[in-house]
Image (tube, coloured by chain):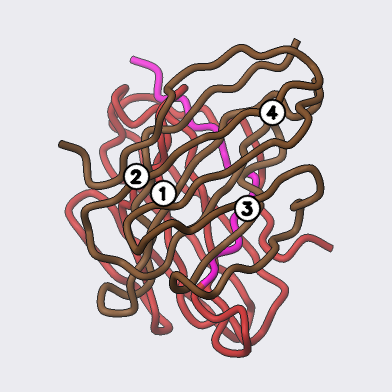
Chain colours: A brown, B red
Amino acid sequence: DADVTQTPRNRITKTGKRIMLECSQTKGHDRMYWYRQDPGLGLRLIYYSFDVKDINKGEISDGYSVSRQAQAKFSLSLESAIPNQTALYFCATSDPGTGYGYTFGSGTRLTVV
Amino acid sequence: QKEVEQNSGPLSVPEGAIASLNCTYSDRVSQSFFWYRQYSGKSPELIMSIYSNGDKEDGRFTAQLNKASQYVSLLIRDSQPSDSATYLCAALRAGGTSYGKLTFGQGTILTVHP
């Protein structure tokens, strides 16, 4: 099994629908992140969590919310999806013991129509 | 000014040549830097990290850091078609409440042609 697992891998949803993207990890890392990737814009941080009780907004949090259900699980929700949220979404984990380099999940390709 | 900037390319090199990828950063408190490789539609994969001024070599890859110039580079020797990918540069802030977050550049597309 992958160290960082994202579900679903692909999703098509309609404008206005609520959708949840899930991330789970087996690395035992406290730190988890959600990024979105758009062509030409690189990876942009949506939310991050340094432990179960610590959740912080990133640079583009509007329209998104998160839940850290346990050390291993960090979910991203789109409350009311809109077409410009169509993107590739990545979950990542990091650990001070390994120099803070991220381990990424395989990504969720989300299309909002 | 973006915190981490890369030339988006595309950079095209012949097989066997040296590919040179460059990155500049604006935040002087950044202390650690990472290079990720990302194949189309796949997740980024960490290939190099560098924390100190100078060069760090790992196989065909060499990372170079110059903190005075706020410049990071990645050299790929003996480039292979399988090196064709997008390369992402990332910087880690040294302190404050955001310590541990990486800031990414927009990526450089590298194409190695036979």
Q: Which residue is mark 3?
A: B105
Is A78 on the left-hand or right-hand side of B36? right
Q: Residues within 10 Å of mark 1 (few under 14, many from 20)?
A: many
Q: Sequence order check: which comes first, mark 2 or mark 1?
A: 1
2 vs 4, front mark = 4
Q: Are marks 2 and 1 in contact (CB under 8 Å)?
A: yes
Check disc 2: other Cα within 10 Å, few if <14, some if 14-19, many if 20+.
some
Q: Amino acid type of disc 3? A: Gly
- Determine crowd level at label 4: few under 14, some 14-19, many 20+ residues with C-alpha closer than 10 A: few
Magenta highlight on residue B108? yes
Q: Give the residues in magenta.
A: B101-114
**Real-space Cα separation, disc 2 to disc 4, in angstroms:** 30 Å
For this rendering, which residue is in front, B24 or B95? Answer: B95
Foreground: B33 or A22?
A22
Disc 1 marks which residue?
B36
Are discs 3 and 1 both within one chain?
A: yes
Q: Tell me whether marks 2 and 4 sit on the same chain.
A: no
- Residue A18, numbered circle: 4
Residue B38: where, in percent of width, then height? 42, 36
Q: In what element is the residue under mark 4? A: loop
Report the front residue among A97 and B94: A97
Q: Amino acid at mark 2?
A: Glu
Residue placed at 39% from the left, 35% from the top? A6
Amino acid residing under circle 1: Tyr
* Helix, strand or loop status at disc 1: strand
Quadrant, the N terminus of chain A:
top left
* The C terminus of chain A sits in image quarter: top right
Residue B85 position within the rendered picture, expressed as x and y whole percent measured from the top left:
43, 30
Q: Secondary structure at mark 2?
A: strand
- Examine the image and state in which quarter residue B79 appears: top left
Residue type for callout 4: Arg
